[in-house]
Each structure stands twice: as structure tokens, then as C-alpha cells.
Amino acid sequence: MNTERHPEEDFFPDRYPLQTFCPEDWQWFLRACNTLDIPVDDDKKPVLEALYSHLAGVNQWLNLTRLTTPIDYLRNHVLDSLTALNVARAVTRPGDLALDLGSGGGYPGLPLMTWLPDRRWLLVDSRPKKAAFLSVALTLTPCRHAAARAFCGHEAPARCPEAAGHCRLVTARAVGKAVDLLPEAEKLLARHGTFLLLKGPAYATEEREPFIKALPKFGMCLAEETKLPLHLPELGLDQERWLVSAKRLR
């Protein structure tokens, strides 16, 4: 009898045991969200537990993340992603198309679609296996207008014309240098759409100047730069995070 397991079958969430967050970890997450003015309803916990369980299970055979404990997941994937929530909500309306570029394991896309399920979401990664993982993971969220595709942003006109020039929001986290992502964003953004980057401390010292200098070449202007208040010793947070948004003008 052939007992070989096919990798494509291992994307199904029911292949992996459901893991729950301990009270201490969840209370930490709630306190951190409250500090950053991120609302958390009771229905968010089972969604995040399902997403975490699926990520941890698939990560056993597909390299998605090096962070595998529940508190690392809540701190460095979910909370970090949700720092973009208020901007994402402000620059989009229900029904707008939002695209997560280089989504990888699904962050910030999966948390953002969990909090903003009335937008249309597209998670994009150049690697087909990761796009296949994402296409299953997004079904664990309350968003019913979402999809995952495998292509690079600059390929959108040929590979995904329904997204090319139609995205009101494009997000990017832990993908690459800000300036290198501009050609990708240019092919995806609608006029007056927003390119939202979640960046670490290297943005201010290494990435900011070439990024801002290159914006006009791609028909964009800097909209906002925010250094987030993530120095919170009482919550064990001591990291520098920048939210950087640019608007497409043409």
C-alpha cells in the first residue's frame, strides 16, 4: 500500500492539531493592542489560533517562519502586522482591493483581512508553494473576498490584470529595500492608491533617502512617515518600527 504523503495535501488545516494560546500570552496581546489603539473583539482569538496552528504545522516541512512559539507569533507576526491597521482602514473603503506584496507566511495580510474583512484582499508571493499555502490560510479568516496568487508585482499586467493599476492599497513587510519595491508598487497601485511599508530601524539610516529620491520617477509622493511607539518595557517590547506610506499621483 502506498503511504507516501503528497506535499500539496499537507496544506489542509485539519492535518494539524489546533493549538490554543495560554491565558498569559493572550492577555499580553490584549494589553499590547490596547496600548497601540488596536481593537480586539472576542471573535479574533479563535481565528488567530487557527492561523497559528496552520502556520506551525505547515512550517514543519515548508520554511515559512523562524518564529514558532505562540508569544513570538503574537508579538512579531500579528501585533507587528496590526500596526498598519489604522492606516489601512483610513486609506481604503469596503470593497476596495488591497494587496499584500511578498506575503510569504501571510503577514501583514492575514491579520489585516481578519480585522478588515469587508475589503477585497489579494496575497501575492512569487513562490508557488507559498501562494498555495496562503490560498488555504486565508479561508481561516472571516474575509470572504480574498485570494492568493503567485507572481511578482511587475508581472501584474500580464499575470494578474485584474490587480494591475486597481489596488487602493499595497502593503509590504520584510520583503526588501523600500526603493527596490517601487517598480512593483507602480504596476499595482490605482491612481491615488497607497503604498504602505512596514520597516525596521534600517529604514531611517539606510533606506529613507534613496526611497524618497526615487518616488517622483514612479509617479508617487511621500504621504506619511510614522515611528511607532514600540518601546514598551512593561510589555517586553523594545523595537523600532516605521510605517511609511506613499501615494500614487498618476
Image (cartoon, rainbow, N blue to C red):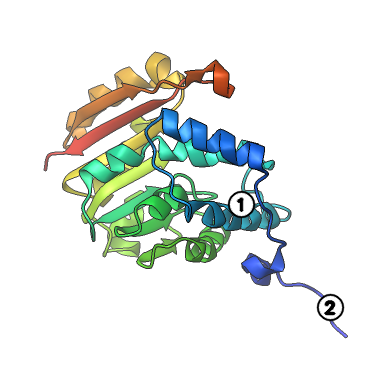
Whether the residues at callouts 1 and 2 have beta carbons within 8 Å, the answer is no
Residue beneath label 2, please? 3
Q: Quadrant of the C terminus?
A: top left
Extreme left residue here? 250
Q: Label 1 amino acid? A: Tyr
Mark closest to the chain's N terminus, 1 or 2: 2
For the residue pair 31 and 145, the one nearer the viewer reads as: 31
Name the residue tied to disc 1. Answer: 52
Q: CA distance from mark 1 to mark 2?
A: 27 Å
Callout in the foreground (1, 2): 1
Q: Quadrant of the N terminus?
A: bottom right
**Mark 2 is on which residue type?**
Thr
Residue extending furthest toward the top:
205
Q: Position of residue 233 (x, y in %)?
A: 55, 16
Position of 36 with respect to 69 (left or right) is left
**Does dot 2 land on a helix, a strand or a loop?**
loop
Does residue 174 appear in this view? no
Q: Position of residue 70 (x, y in %)?
A: 66, 42
Q: Is residue 101 left or right of residue 75?
A: left
Judge the density around disc 2: few (<14), some (14-19), many (≥20) Cα neighbours within 10 Å. few
Residue 175 horizontal side relative to residue 243, left or right: right
Instruction: Give the image location of residue 15, x and y in percent.
Output: 70, 68
Image-quadrant location for residue 26: top right
Q: How many marks?
A: 2
Image height of 220 relative to 20, above or below: above
- Which residue is pictured at 23% across the width and 57% down the height? 94
What number is the disc on residue 240?
none
Tell me which residue sits at (42%, 40%) in the image: 82
**Residue drawn where x is 23% and y is 61% of the image:** 95
